[in-house]
Structure formats: C-alpha cells, structure tokens
Image: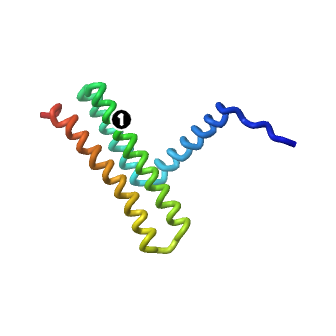
Amino acid sequence: MKQKKESFLVNRLKSVGYAFKGSVYLIRTESSIKIQVFIAIIITIAGFYFDISNTEWLIQTAFIGLVLSLEGMNTAVEYISDFIHPDRHESIGRIKDIAAGAVFFAAITAAIAALIIYIPKII
C-alpha cells in the first residue's frame, strides 16, 4: 500500500522542529556556543542601551547569526570527524582546526564590527 505523501507545509514544520531541537542541543551541551550566546545577549542589551541605528542592528544581528551558525557547523564537523575516526589522527585534527579557524575569522570580524559600532557611543 502506498503511503500518503506529507504536504510541503508539514515537511517545513518538521524541518523547523529538527532545527530547533539541534539548536537547543547545541546550547545545552557545547560550552563554546554557551559563551557565544552569552556574548550575543550582552551585545543585544548594549544595542538597546546605546540605541543603535537600524543599520547597526542589521550588522550586529547578521554577525551574531554568522558566529552562532559557524559555531554550530564547527561542532557538527567535530562530531562527524570523531564518528569517522575516533582515535587521534593528524588529518582529522587539521579538519577540526580549519573548522575552528572559520569560527575564529567570524568572531574576530564580529568583534571589529562591535568596536566600530560601540566605541563612538562610549566615547
């Protein structure tokens, strides 16, 4: 007997549910993402305190999303690397370092953007 195909909307809702489940798992289990979320909350509070412009909000929000997204991808790379090769391996280590480097680039760029936004408001 042929199973009835789920609707597009049902599939999208399920996808959002899986994504939410993954983000909650990340926040609960990964110390690096906890730190990034904490920084995002502090920067968001600063945005309200200093009454940043709409453009500054867009930049800040984009960088927060970028850093959190890359942190999640870095964690996924670490998990899949450990699954594929649980023992220490030079190539797996390099792969993990590269993924962490991508997060580093995003975090440094986000910090620079935050300095550009907030230093004039503090001074």
Measuring from the top left, give residue 38's x and y in whole percent. 36, 44
Residue shown at the point (43%, 71%) measured from the top left:
91
Check disc 1 and report its element: helix, strand or loop. Answer: helix
Residue at the right extreme of this rendering: 1
Crowding near the residue tagged with mark 1, few <14, some 14–19, many ≥20 C-alpha atoms within 10 Å: some
Residue shown at the point (36%, 47%) measured from the top left:
36
Question: Considering depth in this image, is 21 or 104 the residue closer to the camera?
Answer: 104
Q: What residue sits right under mark 1 in the picture?
A: 61
Q: Is residue 80 left or right of residue 40?
A: right
Q: Give the image's coloring scheme.
A: rainbow
Question: Considering depth in this image, is 33 or 15 the residue closer to the camera?
Answer: 15
Kind of residue indicated by mark 1: Thr
Q: Residue 6, located in which quarter of the rendered image?
A: top right
Residue at the left extreme of this rendering: 123
Vertically, is 101 above or below 116? Answer: below
Residue shown at the point (15%, 33%) measured from the top left:
120
